[in-house]
Image: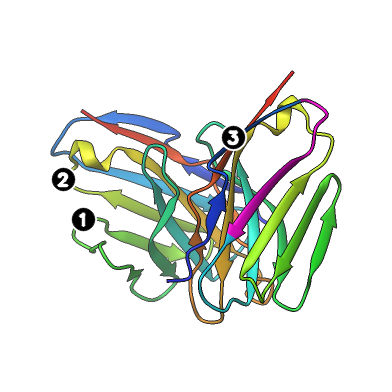
Amino acid sequence: SQQGEEDPQALSIQEGENATMNCSYKTSINNLQWYRQNSGRGLVHLILIRSNEREKHSGRLRVTLDTSKKSSSLLITASRAADTASYFCATGNYGQNFVFGPGTRLSVLP
Amino acid sequence: SAVISQKPSRDICQRGTSLTIQCQVDSQVTMMFWYRQQPGQSLTLIATANQGSEATYESGFVIDKFPISRPNLTFSTLTVSNMSPEDSSIYLCSVEPDRSSYEQYFGPGTRLTVT
């Protein structure tokens, strides 16, 4: 299985602080994607990083990928209460379907 | 990207009945996917639905329980048959508009409660 596993399972921070979530997986991948889910609703695609990339940025989001350690991290800088959500990583490979990790529940306190 | 809608957004159903969930996309896509998210859990792929062919089911999911239709490139349905309380979940459809990008986009989900 190439299931991603997020760490920590839950994270609580104050508004303005940075939040870091980690994702580990077991087998080789072509890409890794991060999604956000608010209150059990649909998933919002945040960012995709390919196996030949090491870092990507999108606004306040920074994603890193270390294929040697089979791990990725999602950093949200200057967090806001609206960032409160569950964050999932999903790994993909050629000819195979996505596998989602269990997710990290982020709470940003005002 | 793609804009995806699902109907119904939520429903409460009785044990033994069936519910059909609709997924509509604003553009033509080849690949559509159906996922289940049980309470407090992550997403599990139920099946891949390609237009013009039978859906491909993942291990643990069978066509008799989760029949899928894909009549055209913008629409799909998932039926949850003979429901039990264990089927209470959020059901999400997703699409992959550009196969080379590997990005999937999700609908808002259907929250199903079986009593």
Above or below, B82 against B85 in this view is below
Closer to us: B73 or B16: B16
User: Does the magenta segment cover residue B45?
Assistant: no
Read off the magenta span.
A15-23
Q: Quadrant of the C terminus of chain A?
A: top right
Callout 1: SS? loop
Residue A88 on image: x %, y %:
57, 50
Contact flag, marks 2 and 1 (Cβ < 8 Å): yes
According to the picture, the residue beneath numbered tag 2 turns out to be: B82
Q: Amino acid at mark 2?
A: Asn
Packing grade of label 2 (10 A; few <14, some 14-19, many >=20) is some
For residue A38, which numbered disc appears in the image? 3
Q: Quadrant of the N terminus of chain A?
A: bottom left
According to the picture, the residue beneath numbered tag 1 turns out to be: B65
Residue extending furthest toward the top = A110
Whether marks 2 and 1 lie on the same chain = yes
Q: Can residue B52 be seen at all in this image of the molecule?
A: yes
